[in-house]
Image: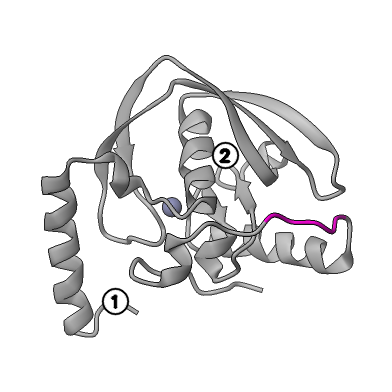
Amino acid sequence: MVNPIVKFGDPVLGREAEPVTEFDTPELHKFLEDMFESMYAAKGVGLAAPQIGFARKIAVIDTSNGENPKEKLVLINPKVLRVEGRQEGEEGCLSIPGFREQVRRGKRVTVRARNAKGEEFEMTGEDLLARAFLHEIDHLYGRLYITHISALKRDLMKRKIKKMQRAGDWD
Ligand SMILES: [Zn+2]
């Protein structure tokens, strides 16, 4: 099932999500399927559970845009273990459609997480995957990528969004 993406302004995007405590349940597997479907429908490379209104520490990533099943990643209760190097690049968010900004991120990022069965694993990603790790894990702590841009750019963006909200173009 494709779920609608929650947009900036919804409080669920601004608070830390709860950790998952039950693994390998039919509900969790179904939820993960829905997350991938919702992400592909929105043409994203990553999606965090709060973005479909569910405040749990779950994120899915697929930097191949559905081209390569091996790139499908599930991160449950993830933590960033290491950030190395730097990369500059444009970043957007499905919850802030229509905007993109330059964001400096680590180039190589190691995370520790659990999979759908509850098994713990560690993984290192570079470039786009490193960026996706940091972006999605930020979501699980109530942080959006705009916390990493200048206050000036952020205020400008917020003003534009307010205008769209008033015009009814932001639901
Ligand atoms: Zn996002």
Point out residue 137 in the picture as x, y percentages from the top left corner.
54, 44
Please, which residue is most extreme toward the top here? 85
From the image, which quarter does the N terminus lie in? Answer: bottom right
Label 1, secondary structure: give it: loop
Per the picture, the main secondary structure of the magenta-coloured stretch is: loop
Q: Residue at x 85, y 39 (%)?
A: 119
> Pointer 2: what residue?
64
N-term-proximal mark, 1 vs 2? 2
Q: Amino acid at mark 1?
A: Trp
Report the magenta residues as a range.
Answer: 19-23
Point out residue 37 in the picture as x, y percentages from the top left corner.
63, 63
> Pointer 1: what residue?
170
The stretch drawn in magenta includes residue 22: yes
Reply above or below: 100 against 63: below
Reply above or below: 141 against 31: above
Q: Residue at x 87, y 48 (%)?
A: 117
Q: Is residue 84 left or right of residue 96?
A: right
How would you rate the neighbour count of disc 1 (Cα within 10 Å): few for under 14, some for 14-19, many for 20 or more? some
Point out residue 59 in the picture as x, y percentages from the top left corner.
61, 51
